[in-house]
Amino acid sequence: MTEYTIEFVGTGETITCTDKQTILSRCLEEGIAQEYSCRVGMCLACSAEILEGEITQPAARGLTEEEAENYALTCMARPQSDLKLDRGKYPPSIEGDLAGGANDGAVADD
């Protein structure tokens, strides 16, 4: 069992995590307020952009193959190296949904 350091950029928070633990479980154990919801790799609430390092997340069904190269679903992701993550960053597929949803139901002024 190998232990890795995970740095969350912009927060000053750092944790250690083994290659057998999920990043989310370690965040919760350390009292770090990592957002999450479903805990099964589907909702993307726990998403973080991978700035440096490698992970494995075979059950991250909510991400496309391309997105899984750049984003971690912390509920599924296990480190394979030291990491730098930017929490609260979502893949383009959901960012587009969020931007489009901001105007749903809005009434334009004439």
Image (cartoon, helix red, strand yellow):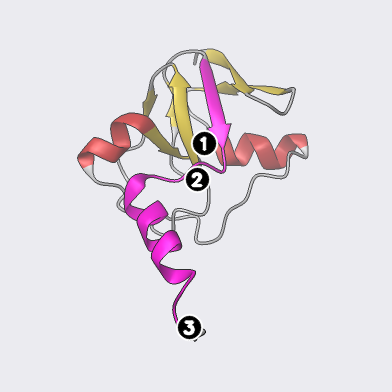
Q: Are marks 2 and 1 in contact (CB under 8 Å)?
A: yes
Q: Is disc 2 surrounded by few (<14), some (14 to 19) or many (20+) residues within 10 Å? A: many
User: Marks 1 and 3, Cα distance to the nearest angstrom?
Assistant: 45 Å
Q: Amino acid at mark 1?
A: Thr
Q: Residue 17 at what x, y percent from top left? A: 59, 23
Q: Are marks 2 and 3 in contact (CB under 8 Å)?
A: no
Residue wearing tag 3: 108
- Residue drawn at (50%, 61%) of the image: 38
Q: Residue 55 at what x, y percent from top left? A: 39, 25
Left or right side of 26 for 80: left
Residue wearing tag 2: 75
Q: Amino acid at mark 3?
A: Ala
- Residue drawn at (75%, 34%) of the image: 30
Q: Nearer the viewer, mark 1 or mark 3?
A: 3
Residue wearing tag 1: 22
Q: Residue 82 at what x, y percent from top left? A: 51, 13
User: Marks 2 and 1, Cα distance to the nearest angstrom?
Assistant: 6 Å
Q: Which residues are magenta?
A: 83-104
